[in-house]
Amino acid sequence: MASKTNAVRIVQQKKYPFKEAFYDYDPDDLNGMHAAQAIGFPPEQVFKTLVAKGNKNGIMVLCLPVCCELDLKKA
């Protein structure tokens, strides 16, 4: 069993409903679409977290479905 991440601790503390899903993965293929398929969830319900640095807004933390690509102009 994996140890708790800070994200899991936060959602538990806030009492948000959530479900953890574990799967075997290939460290050379960390594709979110593969993760969604492995856990049997639609890609629209599996999220990736990206961190970007903008020229005007500084650091941004973005969460989007694994089936989507980041559009920096919209971010």
Image (tube, helix red, strand yellow):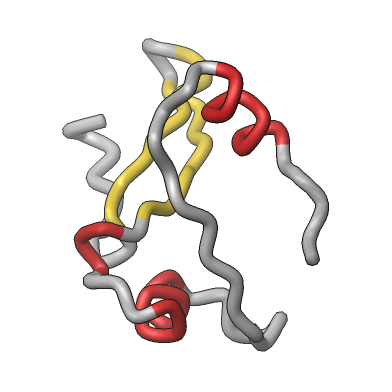
Quarter occupied by the C terminus:
top left
Q: Is residue 6 left or right of residue 21?
A: right
Q: Residue at x 43, y 24 (%)?
A: 54
Quadrant housing residue 6 = top right
- Where 23 falls versus 68 (above or below)? below
Q: How many marks?
A: 0
Quadrant housing residue 27 = bottom right
Q: Residue at x 65, y 85 (%)?
A: 24
Q: Residue at x 48, y 43 (%)?
A: 50
Q: Residue 46, percent across and down?
A: 34, 59
Closest to the observer: 38 or 13? Answer: 13
Q: Is residue 23 left or right of residue 58?
A: right
Q: Residue 15, percent across and down?
A: 47, 23
Quadrant housing residue 28 = bottom right
Q: Residue at x 43, y 43 (%)?
A: 18
Q: Residue 40, percent across and down?
A: 34, 80
Q: Residue 32, percent across and down?
A: 43, 70
Closest to the observer: 39 or 68? Answer: 39
Closest to the observer: 64 or 69? Answer: 64
Closest to the observer: 22 or 63? Answer: 22
Quarter occupied by the N terminus:
bottom right
Q: Is residue 68 left or right of residue 35?
A: left
